[in-house]
Amino acid sequence: MRFLTFSIFLLLLSCAPFPKKMGYQPTSLDAREIRNPYFADVQKDYVYKANIIVFENNFGGILVLKKLADQTHRIAFTTELGNTIFDFTLSGTDFKVNRILKEMDRKILLSILEQDFRSLIQEEIVPLNIYTKNDSELTKTKIGSKTHFYTFKNDILTNITRVGNEKEKVVITFSEIDDRMARQIVISHKTMKLTISLQAIK
């Protein structure tokens, strides 16, 4: 009987809305401006030592992310010897592949990388709902057709979580945050073997 009760509890928990599972409670939706500040400076080159694990491949090198204009970013990933692994331009709804290594030139992988980097660089966040827990705030929004939750702790953005069927699909974690820059970033996929680790070097 106890096992059955516990099983029912787990089933109900798994079906619960994502904020509730994380212990957040809904709050009033106000008119505050909510932004991701980490890649917003058009004067700055964001340079990271990068490691990408995708399927059975491991790529290491330097990733440079540059804001070119409003809603336009260039993202280039090269080996430390300067060979291009990929070079993308994201602008509005456009995604341009400037160059890419043959081993990574797969339609499904390009679609996943586009979504990951769009989530990473999205500046303006249009809140659909806001939830709170202690000193944390969870903001629900949409990027394209995907549901995302932004976690702020003491007004500092610490996580972006892409959710499907009320379950985590992708988690972007920001740490070593200093002066509107996250010096360490990890993009972790929960349903496939893909992890992007970034450590600022400039």
Image: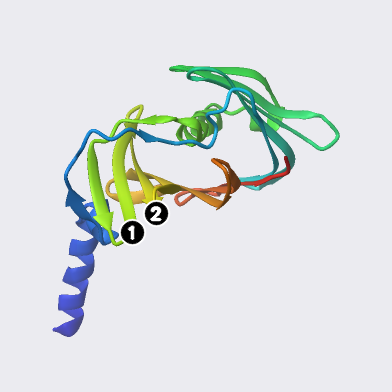
Work out whether 12 lies above or below 118.
Answer: below
Foreground of the two, 25 or 80 = 25
Residue 102 in the image: state x and y as whole percent: 70, 27
Give the mark count: 2
Q: Can residue 113 be seen here? A: yes
Asked if the residue under mark 2 is in contact with the one under mark 1, i.e. CB atoms within 8 Å, the reply is yes
Residue 131 x/y as whole percent: 24, 50
Colour mapping: rainbow
Q: Which residue is mark 1?
A: 135
The x, y position of residue 139, in whole percent, is 30, 43
Q: Secondary structure at mark 1?
A: loop
Q: Which of pointers 1 and 2 lies earlier in the amino acid sequence?
A: 1
Front in this rendered view, residue 112 or 87: 87
Check the picture and name the quadrant holding the N terminus. Answer: bottom left
Query: Looking at this rendering, what residue extends furthest in the right direction?
Result: 81
Residue type (three-letter) at the residue carrying disc 2:
Lys
Q: Would residue 65 appear left or right of 180 to someone viewing this image? A: right
Question: Relative to residue 165, is residue 12 drawn left or right?
Answer: left
As helix, strand or loop, the secondary structure at mark 2 comes to strand
| Outermost residue, bottom side | 2
The amino acid sitting under disc 1 is Asp
Circle 1 residues within 10 Å: few <14, some 14–19, many ≥20:
few
x and y, in percent, of residue 91 in the image = 50, 17
Quadrant including the C terminus: top right
Taking 99 as reference, is 165 left or right?
A: left
Which quadrant of the view contains residue 47?
top right
Q: Is residue 12 above or below residue 176?
A: below
Instruction: List the residue tagged with mark 2.
Output: 153
